[in-house]
Each structure stands twice: as structure tokens, then as C-alpha cells.
Image (cartoon, grey):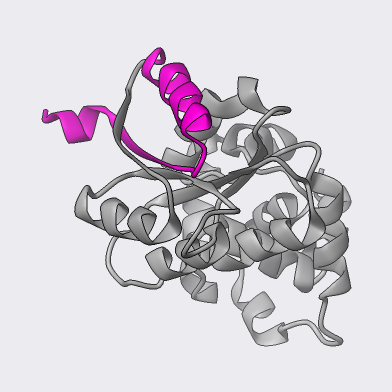
Amino acid sequence: MTETRTHIRVLIADDNRSVRKGLRLQLEAAGGIRIVGEVANGVDAVRVARAEAVDVVLMDMQMPGLNGADATRELLDGGGPAPAVIVMTSFAVDGYITDAIDAGAVGYLLKSYDADQLVGAVYAAARGEAVVSTRAITPVLREFVRRRGPKPDLDLLDSLSPAERRVVAMLASGVTANEAIAAALHVSVHTVRTQLQSALRKTGLADRTQLALWGVRNRLDDEAARSV
């Protein structure tokens, strides 16, 4: 197998050189991860991520030229295979969090608080799993509940099988790891993956984070407690 298949290719985008160095040292000490580049602004983040076909981007929110949310949106709207983006910032600010996730980021971590979660977050993002700092969960859920529309999308809800609906309900309630969903619902991890893929296809959504948001907006998180 080639190196690109055996290693998770990571790009670090942060305008602070010391931060970039610290992230690089931490990730290079972990197995299965290769740092393919460092950039200091959002424009270069988009350019290098596409040129290097990276798997995961660690994206700072506050950068010159193009901020992290706009860079994430541009990168993921470009068509074709797209990397998983983990936003890393110093602040658990409600607006930052929702801007990042709306843009398509699969993760939101705080640089100082979540340093010990970084390697695991990169592995999880490469598997297609969402990663949100425990310091950010409350504002995320509060904002998603606030955004709920007056009427659920009944047609799409009805298109889900009961099993798919239970899995999406768990995801919407904040249980993001396949293993945790499987344990809660007493099914296999393979079953969870299959049902999530089917739900994504039926709803036309691009990733698990968007599916979780859709589930919250359609009140599936309220069903999670009844699924276990």
C-alpha cells in the first residue's frame, strides 16, 4: 500500500507559528499520521488542502485573509472528495461554534482545554465521526434547539426506517461515536455504520454533523431516550 493510504494526511492551518509547531510535534509522535503542510491563512489552507489531497485539516477560526469558517465552507463547496475539518480555537464562543459547523466542520476543539484529545480527534475525523469539545456541547445544543423550524420534515422522516431513525436520534442527542451508539442500541458497529450511510443517502446530507443537526431540527433528539 502507498503512504497516502496507510497514513492520515493532515494539514495545519493557524496563523500562530508556535501553535503550528506544537500541533505538529504532538501529531508526528502518534502513529499513522503524516503532516503534509502548515499554512498561516485561510486562502492557503484551501489551496494546499486541495493540492495535497489531505484527509484532515486542523483549522484555526481567526486567520488573516479568510477566516476558518469561510475557508472551511469554500473548501467543502469545491466539489469532489473533501477533507474532514476540525476547527481549533481558543474560544468556546457560540457564534464561532455554529459558524464552524454550519460551514461543514466535523469537529470543534479548544486549543488549551482539548490538547489531550487531538490525536483521537484526528483519527475520529478520518473515520467520518464528529468531535466536539465538552466545553462546546452546551452552546451547540442550545443553538440547534433554537433553530428548530415550526414543522418537522415529515416526508424525509417517514423515509427513514425505524432502525435508521433510532440511530439518527442517538446522533442528534450528542452520541457521536459509532461504538457508543451501538452499545446504547445493543446493535453492532457495522449496523450503525450501515444505517447512518443509508440515512445520509435518504436525506441528501453530506456528513454526520449535518445529519446530527438535521435530527435536532426535526426533534429526533427527543426520541433518543426512548430508543434505549
In which image quadrant can residue 37 be found? Answer: top left
Report the residue at 53% width, 36% height from top. 189
Q: Is residue 93 above or below residue 77?
A: above
Q: Residue furthest left?
A: 1
Report the residue at 60% width, 77% height from top. 159
In which image quadrant can residue 215 be found? Answer: bottom right
Q: 222 or 78: nearer the eye?
A: 78
Q: Looking at the image, can residue 75 be seen?
A: yes
Instruction: Check residue 28 for magenta coloring.
Output: yes
Image check: 146 left or right of 73? right
Q: Is residue 128 above or below residue 120?
A: below
Q: Is residue 38 above or below residue 217?
A: above
In which image quadrant can residue 158 be found? Answer: bottom right
Residue 143 spot, x, y in % from top left: 83, 64
Tag count in the figure?
0
Residue 108 spot, x, y in % from top left: 64, 46
Q: 152 or 14: nearer the eye?
A: 14
Q: 135 or 169: nearer the eye?
A: 135
Q: Looking at the image, can residue 211 be seen?
A: no
Image check: 72 left or right of 220? left
Instruction: Check residue 15 for magenta coloring.
Output: yes
Residue 106 spot, x, y in % from top left: 55, 51
Residue 119 spot, x, y in % from top left: 51, 24
Report the residue at 63% width, 60% height from top. 101
Quarter of the image where the C terminus is located: top right
Q: 191 or 201: nearer the eye?
A: 201
Q: Residues in magenta? A: 1-30
Q: Residue furthest top?
A: 29
Quarter of the image where the N terminus is located: top left
